[in-house]
Image (tube, grey):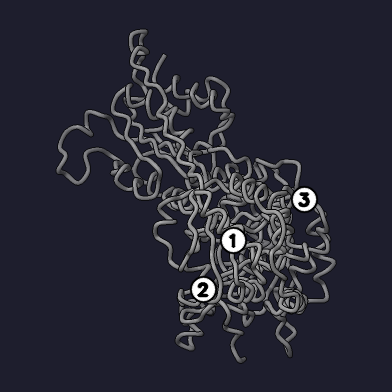
Amino acid sequence: MFVADWVAEVFQNNAIDRIFLYPGGTIVPLINACLKIGIQVECFKSEQGAGYAALAYGRLTGKPQVVMVTSGPGVTNVLSCLADAYYDSTPFILITGQIGTNDLKVRKSVRQRGFQETPTVDLTSPISKKASCMMSPEDVFRDVPDAFRLAMAGRKGPVVIDFPMDMQRLELHADDFSKLVGRHRQDDKSATVKPEIFADIVDAASKARRPVLLLGQGALQAAAYDRYIELANRLSALVVTSFLGIGSFDTSDAKHLGYIGHTGHLVANKAVSECDFLLVLGSRLDVRQTGTVIDKFVPNGRVAWVNSDSTELANARVDVEWKIEMDVSAFCEKLIANYRERAGDIDNEWHESLLSLKRERKDDPPLKGTTYMQPRPVLDALQRVMGDLPVTVVTGVGCHQHWAARHLSFRPNACRLLTSGGHGTMGYDLPSAIGAAMAQPDRPILCVVGDGSLLMNIQELASLKERELNVKILVMNNSRLGLVSQFQQITWNADPTTGDFKAPNFPAIARGFGLTADRVEVAEELEEKIKQFWNQPGPTLLEVRIDSDADVVPMLLGGQHMGEMWMGRIL
């Protein structure tokens, strides 16, 4: 057998039944080896298309998927996907082709030693859990099987295997297998909480009059959904999430206030700012969550922070009284087992004031005195049509991303949100929707996208049509690169590069790729066209012309603390 054949068998042994790729010469031997043993090849129209489809597939299945690209431009084109996987903690295996080992070993000081060569390991090491180049069979035997374990160990993330073409084609003989290396094992680093520290946390939680539970991406991945409900009930806590934690708690639950941060719900930010005890499960507490005024994050309360990443805990941006390096599920089990009953009264007046504020819906109020369509009523109309149907929502990056997160409904095991969080990549949308539909072929996938973000990977409409997947693409076209335009307007009172975005005819483009497509330009047609769009079988696109003056309102700006938010421009 050849090295490529052995690697394909490793894929199969790790339940990989398909690979995501954009082909090129230096990766072809491994592609052919996969085909030979029946692994399905999913070929997209660009490396980003393949990478983002695999990311969505991996996030929904909870298992790392394999992406293959060629050397040189194949590598550089997929770097955004790799960064997304790293910053949003998604398990991911990237296999990159590379020039031959003989060329790699010589002329080390020259700029390029072979056609389409890039220093893949150097480029990818800072944004992966591990990146290594296969220079010998021993490297292959060690690193390829271990990649699957490493991608899932601790805080999940991507692993990169750089594969010289001659190594893929190297013939293996019986004595080569004596060099097989056992999988790397890491000691279990799940820390246990000292009894006295845990007792302090339990005591603080039981005495808190204004407790709040914050669920992050780590909580979503832990999927201990029943435990979060029990914790909220036991602690009499209100519940908020991070942006990437959306879906870890039913957004229609009375205790749920929304997500926090830069574009979070007003009432969720207010709750965190005013609480006296905040329990954080699996969130980074980064600047987009806490704002820049870090000394006023939970100014009159105590914070307990549970995270599996010791580096995050060691580099807290805000004051945290208890830092617990522990699996979220294990912590929940331990807290519930040790928590008996409240030792103090809840501030019911505060609770009720927040629930009342939630009902007022201060987020993205429709502009008055205009006939143009507003984002919130559009999404409300869509939600009415979708009802309680299980739907996975995928977004791009921009105003539409936050409108969708604020105004659509999400709940565990049914309605999930997939979006680019830490890296914030426009173009994440369409290919990720395709990957989501491949992972969940029995449910509709809603792709909410803006006119700017869709253009980044619009070529993947071809990949969508080829597979005839049930993806509904809602284009919220405000003829503006909205978030950056909003930032420019707030800061400099002008948006010269982003405020007049000339979008193409999206329905015509979609029809050119073979999709059913339509457009809504007036509010009177919205309800009917939304129904037609949602009930149309197969891949469908609907462009909705949104008021270009509609901003993401409110917003937490630089220099503001969690208890105050910018409430919009005076138009």
User: Mark 2: which amino acid?
Assistant: Phe
Instruction: Give the alpha-carbon distance from disc 1 to disc 2, as whole Å.
Output: 13 Å
Query: Could you say where residue 340 lies in the image, as x and y percent from the top left?
Result: 70, 54
Q: Amino acid at mark 1?
A: Leu
SS label for mark 1? strand
Query: Marks 2 and 1: in contact by CB < 8 Å?
Result: no
Residue 541, quarter of the rendered image: bottom right
**Crowd class of label 2 (few under 14; some 14 to 19; many from 20; radius 10 Å):** many
Alpha-carbon span between mark 3 and mark 1: 29 Å
Give the residue at mark 1. 279
550 or 565, nearer to the observer:
565
User: Which residue is denoted by mark 3 in the rendering?
Assistant: 390
Q: Which of the numbered marks, if any, corresponds to residue 297?
A: 2
Q: Is residue 473 left or right of residue 328?
A: right
Question: Where does residue 120 sit, x and y in percent of width and height?
Answer: 32, 43
Disc 3 marks a residue whose amino acid type is: Pro
In the rendered view, would you say 552 is above or below 30? Answer: below
Q: Along the line of sight, which residue is nearer the eye, 534 or 306?
A: 306
From the viewer's side, name the closer residue of 490 and 515.
Answer: 490
Q: Which type of secondary structure does the marked residue at label 2 adopt?
A: loop
Q: Earlier in the sequence, mark 3 or mark 1?
A: 1
